[in-house]
């Protein structure tokens, strides 16, 4: 195999060894592309765990096992910030872990899970902060990222990152504006030194549009609530009227029953009860001596029956 031509100055092209062959790729080059020529044992172990976690997540769809590999990899790197290669591997492990948690419907644990490896919100990598904002916005809980995003954007070190502008826009559109924090959004835009005047003007126009939409939605909700209140009052009024009618009928019925109750001949009823007791218990109904008592008892019951029933509804009594 012919050796490659040398560049001016007598040097070989970068990345080629003796005989024109490329040197074997180191672990960071395999995971990140361009990286340092050597990895520490912890970084190499974390990169291996990253490959396993990605395979378990994408190919085998074993989300719990993928999460375990990510936790083991992040734990092997330790809490202290390391070289750029370690930082990238740790970020990639957290990205895979976030996806695994989301697939297992454990998205509520995402922020706390990430912060146990970065400890402070302003130390989060831009990629992880972006994923967290989009995740909690999708599940309609943007308030979770309110303080985290604010702390990250106020950090002076993060303001020098190239992703700062895009994350600021993401935080405005998916966290502050959906929560109705329009004054806080304007204050954040005006106090940002990274944005130029045109970008600030564009953000302010977006905030004004969202505020108008928010006001219109509140007015629509208020009108809808008023209609529901009126409908409820109408239903309650109809029910109250029916209840009042039923109570009136019940009062009339009770009054009619009480008037019949007052006309009952108590003395005769007591006498009839006593005679019934004598006939049934003390005397023999078949005996001739019980006949006068039975006749008197029948007569008393007829009088009580006539007193209870009104003349209109009184049934005919036959001997």
Image (cartoon, helix red, strand yellow):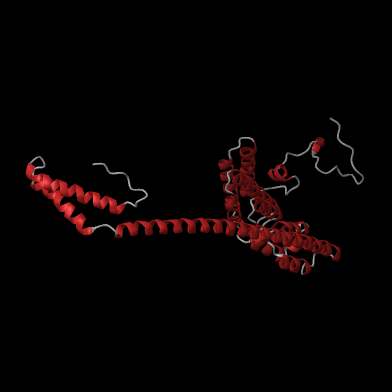
Q: Position of residue 43 (x, y in %)?
A: 64, 48
Quarter of the image with the N terminus is: top right
Judge by depth and name the residue closer to the eye, 188 or 220.
220
Q: Residue furthest top?
A: 1
Corner quadrant of residue 234:
bottom right
Q: Position of residue 142 (x, y in %)?
A: 65, 57
Judge by depth and name the residue closer to the eye, 18 or 192.
192
* 99 over 198 or under it: above or below: above
Q: Residue furthest front?
A: 319
Q: Residue at x 55, y 56 (%)?
A: 238
Q: Position of residue 169 (x, y in %)?
A: 76, 58
Corner quadrant of residue 203:
bottom right
Quarter of the image with the C terminus is: top left
Q: Is residue 140 left or right of residue 298?
A: right
Q: Residue at x 14, y 53 (%)?
A: 274
Corner quadrant of residue 252:
bottom left
């Amino acid at each position: 195999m012919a050796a490659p031509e040398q560049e001016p100055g007598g040097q070989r092209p970068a990345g080629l060894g003796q005989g024109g062959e490329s040197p074997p790729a180191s672990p960071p080059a395999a995971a990140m592309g361009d990286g340092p020529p050597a990895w520490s044992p912890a970084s190499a172990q974390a990169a291996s765990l990253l490959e396993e976690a990605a395979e378990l997540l994408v190919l085998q769809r074993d989300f719990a096992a993928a999460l375990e590999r990510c936790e083991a990899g992040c734990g092997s790197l330790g809490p202290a910030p390391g070289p750029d290669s370690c930082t990238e591997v740790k970020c990639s492990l957290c990205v895979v872990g976030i996806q695994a948690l989301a697939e297992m419907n454990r998205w509520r644990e995402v922020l706390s899970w990430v912060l146990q490896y970065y400890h402070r919100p302003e130390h989060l990598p831009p990629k992880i902060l972006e994923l967290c904002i989009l995740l909690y916005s999708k599940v309609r809980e943007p308030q979770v990222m309110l303080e985290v995003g604010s702390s990250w954007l106020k950090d002076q070190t993060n303001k020098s990152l190239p992703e700062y502008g895009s994350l600021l826009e993401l935080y405005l559109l998916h966290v502050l504006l959906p929560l109705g924090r329009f004054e806080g959004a304007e204050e954040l835009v005006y106090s940002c030194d990274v944005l130029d005047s045109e970008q600030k003007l564009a953000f302010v126009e977006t905030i004004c549009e969202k505020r108008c939409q928010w006001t219109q939605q509140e007015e629509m909700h208020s009108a809808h609530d008023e209609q529901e209140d009126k409908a409820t009052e109408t239903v309650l009024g109809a029910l109250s009227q029916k209840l009042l009618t039923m109570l009136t009928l019940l009062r009339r019925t009770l009054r009619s029953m009480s008037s019949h109750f007052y006309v009952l001949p108590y003395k005769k009823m007591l006498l009839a009860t006593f005679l019934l007791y004598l006939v049934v218990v003390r005397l023999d109904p078949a005996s001739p001596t019980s006949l006068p008592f039975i006749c008197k008892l029948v007569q008393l019951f007829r009088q009580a029956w006539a007193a209870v029933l009104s003349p209109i509804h009184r049934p005919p009594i036959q001997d």
